[in-house]
Image: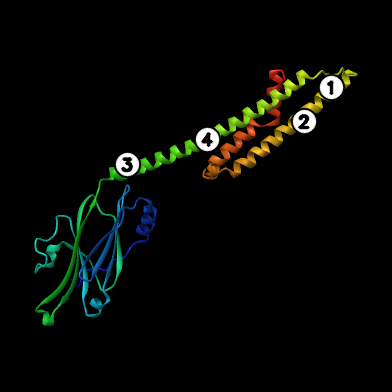
Amino acid sequence: MDDIVRRVVPDRVSRDLQATTENMLPARVHRGGGVFVESQLALGIEPALTLDWSVTPSYFAKGFTLMIFRSLSGFSPEKYPEDLNQHGQLIIETTRNDSYHTRPEEGTHYFTFLLHKRGFLGLSERMEIVRFSETVPSAKVGIGRIKDKIELQSMLRRHALDDIEHEAKLYEAELRLIRSRENLDKSRTPTPRKASTGDDILNGEIAAIDSILETFVAKREKLKALKRDPRFKKLSPTERKAIIDAIEERLDAAEITARREMRGS
């Protein structure tokens, strides 16, 4: 077994594992004798498996070696066979605590952690063993989880936008109500006869300026209230910009003036 290559984790695998953190299943703990193992499977298009182990320090100090085997056909019928290869393929041989990252293929993987020490003159052996299996589902399961997550996020965004759009419509209705009350008050109040046509033009321009001013004030207050809205804060920068652009368009002073003139206000 001297030709076993010690495990090296590629940088690409580490980066990929970080990207699958959100799809991690709960960690499982396995123990036996002085060996403690934690396994955690991440589902996705390419499932990932992480194995972390620790051994009671006194074992390594006494010359024990941890040997890790993997099999795709099952556990060895004998827990302590004379031929250790019956446990499967030897993938790691180490004398320290560490972790192992892999991209397992679909199916059930059988792991055997064997704490091994050969006796005096190689005549006898002492062992501690931990065995467990991990079942890797098909890629369809991971893809389904990703699709469900994307759909949920999309629904949440639509819900937030609907709430903001509803509130914007309420503000518009409130503005229309204010205008209607102003028009009603004007209709009930006798309008004094203007001294000249020049005064009518001047008063009309002043009223138009007042309307523009009210529009700018209403838009500023709406934008200020919107930035304090917790629903708005949860939106992405693109979605926030879309809402602000909609408010800018709907409460544009020139646009409102043009609509009022078309309605005969």
* Mark 3 residue crowding within 10 angstroms, few (<14) / some (14–19) / many (20+): few
Circle count? 4
Inter-mark Cα distance, 4 to 2: 31 Å
Q: Which amino acid type is marked by label 1?
A: Ile
Residue at horizontal 59 percent and vertical 30 percent from the top: 170
User: Could you say whether the residue bearing mark 1 is in a helix, strand or loop?
Assistant: helix
Q: Which amino acid type is marked by label 3?
A: Gly
Q: Are marks 4 and 3 in contact (CB under 8 Å)?
A: no
Residue 135 in percent (x, y) is at 22, 52
Q: Which residue reaches farthest front?
A: 188
Q: Is residue 113 above or below residue 196?
A: below
Q: Quadrant of residue 61?
A: bottom left
Q: Which callout, 4 or 1, points to the residue nearer the camera?
A: 4
Q: Are marks 3 and 1 in contact (CB under 8 Å)?
A: no
User: Could you say whether the residue bearing mark 3 is in a helix, strand or loop?
Assistant: helix
* Mark 1 residue crowding within 10 angstroms, few (<14) / some (14–19) / many (20+): few
Mark identifier at residue 210: 2
Q: Which amino acid type is marked by label 2?
A: Asp
Relative to 206, 149 lies left or right: left
Inter-mark Cα distance, 4 to 1: 42 Å
Is residue 111 something that shows in the picture?
no
Mark identifier at residue 201: 1
The numbered mark, 3 or 1, whose residue comes first in the sequence reads 3
Mark identifier at residue 144: 3
The numbered mark, 4 or 3, whose residue comes first in the sequence reads 3
Q: Residue 75 or 157: which is nearer the viewer?
A: 157
Is residue 45 something that shows in the picture?
yes
Q: Is residue 34 above or below residue 19?
A: below
Relative to 65, 217 lies left or right: right
The numbered mark, 4 or 1, whose residue comes first in the sequence reads 4
Residue identifier under label 4: 163
